[in-house]
């Protein structure tokens, strides 16, 4: 279990990675410096992704808790770890150095640094930092926080209108079919990156159906925040969303509520 002191160290690492991102985000020659490349799945990769990756990779090995510092790391920017090795991991760090790269390129501020501690397939702790707004979500030992204040999901027991958070950049053809089956009126709350799960965690939204592709590093840290806040993160089969249980790093569709 991650201690309070270790969580503070994790938050500091996320801020340092966020600073590396913001140096590029705020640069006068931003358009030239983002140097967009295509990843294997055709999603964008920028200098900021790589800069944040290098910060997190190095800083995690300096954690005061040496057992945590020695854990293996799986990052979006270093994901080519063979399944034969990875399937032996019980505990490890799962990292997305810059989640919401499309939002970063659009310069709308809705991008995050995500660091999660996975224990036996479940996110045990995590930090989600939005450097453009200096907003820090974090979770450990069954408590979730936003900028140091405890947050809780499901603060409104029976809302008349559901606030449904959805992706700003990844519309899903299955989404409208799902929404048409809701038994209440709803309003959409568009948001980028892993902040969507965090909105449910802090009761700013009631529901987040993810009926489109995501990878495990996209969700793990915010999943930890949502769970600690009292939300559920379930697959369409009603099973808890899990990590490192298969060779593919793609998530199934899931619902956060």
Image (cartoon, helix red, strand yellow):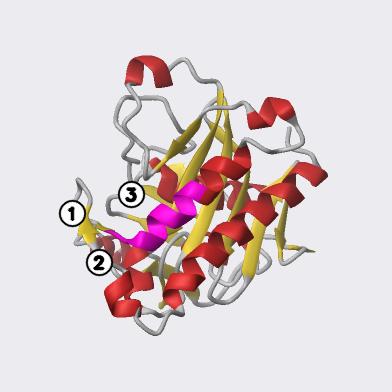
- Residue 22 versus residue 234 in the image, above or below: below
Per the model, the C-alpha gap separating discs 2 and 1 is 16 Å
Disc number placed over residue 142 in the picture, else none: none
Residue for badge 2: 171
Residue 104 location (% of width, % of height): 38, 71
- Which residue occupies 67% across, 38% down? 62
Q: Can you see residue 168?
A: no
- Labels 2 and 1: the sequence-earlier one: 1
Tell me which secondary structure the magenta stretch mostly adopts: helix
Residue 139, x across and y down, in percent: 68, 50
Residues rendered magenta in the picture: 45-54
- Disc with the residue nearer the chain's start (3 vs 1): 1
Q: What residue do we see at 65% from left, 32% from top? A: 69
Q: Position of residue 2 (x, y in %)?
A: 73, 37
Residue at 75% x, 51% y is: 8
- Dot 1 crowding, Cα within 10 Å, few <14, some 14–19, many 20+: few
Q: Name the one closer to the observer, 125 or 171.
A: 125
| Disc 1 secondary structure class | loop
- In the visual, does 129 lie left or right of 151? left
Residue named by callout 3: 214
Camera-nearest label, 2 or 1: 1
Callout 3 secondary element: loop
Residue 43 visible in the current orientation: yes
Q: Which mark is residue 42?
A: 1
In the rendered structure, does residue 44 fall within the stretch colored magenta? no
- Number of other residues with Cα within 10 Å of mark 2, as a class: few under 14, some 14 to 19, many 20 or more: few
Dot 2: what SS? loop
Q: CA distance from mark 3 to mark 1?
A: 13 Å
């Amino acid at each position: 279990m991650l201690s309070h002191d270790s969580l503070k160290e994790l938050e500091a690492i996320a801020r340092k990675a966020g600073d590396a991102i913001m140096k590029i985000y705020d640069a006068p020659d931003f358009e030239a410096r983002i140097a967009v490349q295509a990843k294997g799945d055709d999603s964008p990769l920028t200098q900021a992704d790589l800069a944040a990756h290098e910060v997190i990779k190095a800083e995690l090995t300096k954690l005061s808790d040496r057992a945590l510092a020695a854990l293996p790391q799986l990052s979006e920017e270093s994901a080519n770890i063979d399944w034969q090795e990875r399937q032996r991991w019980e505990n490890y760090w799962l990292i997305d150095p810059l989640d919401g790269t499309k939002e970063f390129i659009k310069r709308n501020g809705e991008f995050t640094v995500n660091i999660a501690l996975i224990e036996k397939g479940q996110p045990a702790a995590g930090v989600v930092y939005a450097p453009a707004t200096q907003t820090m979500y974090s979770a450990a030992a069954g408590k979730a926080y936003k900028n140091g204040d405890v947050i809780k999901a499901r603060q409104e027991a029976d809302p008349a209108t559901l606030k449904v958070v959805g992706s700003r950049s990844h519309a899903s053809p299955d989404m409208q079919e799902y929404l048409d089956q809701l038994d209440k009126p709803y309003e959409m709350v568009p948001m980028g990156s892993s902040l969507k799960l965090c909105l449910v965690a802090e009761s700013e939204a009631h529901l987040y159906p993810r009926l489109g592709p995501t990878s495990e590093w996209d969700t793990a840290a915010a999943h930890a925040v949502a769970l600690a806040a009292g939300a559920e993160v379930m697959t369409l089969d009603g099973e808890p969303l899990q990590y490192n249980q298969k060779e593919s790093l793609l998530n199934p569709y899931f619902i956060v509520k």
